[in-house]
Image (spheres, rainbow, N blue to C red):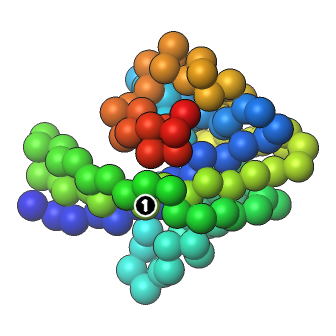
């Protein structure tokens, strides 16, 4: 089984958090895999730039860590979730990794088809 380390962010603008959907319609916080010899924060910034064209945001504290297994890929994922903010809802350029995005009130996130790790991260933040 292979190990993958990921960094994700609950990125807030005023009272809404950013969700992104994969091509299968599963919603999640943005972020992704950390490359070899890359620090978590560096990898998260790289991922947000690659996935969304987003470079200007304030990175806050780590709010949750999680892990899960993807048996079909023989993969063990360990993820670190940060909380962050942007002053204004930025124009975002979605990469092919995502089909759409939404700025969502935290109370409404569960009405989307979100990944279990996203729910656990929200609960860790008390949302």
Question: In the image, is residue 77 above or below residue 93?
Answer: below
Question: In the image, is residue 114 above or below residue 36?
Answer: above
Q: Position of residue 3 (x, y in %)?
A: 22, 65
Image quadrant where one finds the C terminus: top right
The residue lying at 66 percent from left, 37 percent from top is 18
Q: Position of residue 37 (x, y in %)?
A: 43, 86
The residue lying at 30 percent from left, 60 percent from top is 78
Describe residue 91's horizontal placement relative to residue 116 as left or right.
right
> Looking at this rendering, what residue extends furthest in the top direction?
111
Q: Residues within 10 Å of mark 1 (few under 14, many from 20)?
A: many
Report the residue marked by disc 1.
Answer: 80
The residue lying at 76 percent from left, 62 percent from top is 58
Question: In the image, is residue 111 above or below residue 59?
Answer: above
User: Can you tell which quarter of the image residue 33 is in?
Assistant: bottom left
Towards the viewer: 55 or 41: 41
Q: Position of residue 53 (x, y in %)?
A: 74, 52
The residue lying at 44 percent from left, 19 percent from top is 113
Towards the viewer: 23 or 18: 18
> Looking at this rendering, what residue extends furthest in the bottom direction?
37
> Looking at this rendering, what residue extends furthest in the right direction?
88
Q: Position of residue 80 (x, y in %)?
A: 43, 60
Q: Is residue 70 visible?
A: yes
User: Can you tell which quarter of the image residue 45 is in?
Assistant: bottom right
User: Can you tell which quarter of the image residue 60 is in?
Assistant: bottom right
């Amino acid at each position: 089984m292979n190990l993958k380390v990921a960094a994700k962010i609950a990125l807030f603008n005023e009272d809404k958090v950013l969700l992104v959907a994969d091509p299968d319609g599963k919603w999640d916080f943005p972020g992704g895999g950390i490359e070899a010899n890359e620090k978590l924060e560096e990898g998260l910034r790289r991922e947000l730039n690659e996935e969304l064209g987003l470079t200007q945001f304030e990175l806050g504290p780590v709010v949750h860590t999680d892990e899960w297994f993807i048996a079909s890929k023989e993969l063990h994922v360990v993820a670190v979730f940060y909380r962050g903010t942007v002053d204004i809802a930025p124009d975002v350029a979605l990469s092919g990794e995502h089909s759409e995005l939404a700025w969502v009130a935290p109370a409404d996130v569960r009405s989307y088809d979100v990944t279990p790790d996203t729910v656990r991260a929200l609960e860790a933040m008390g949302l």
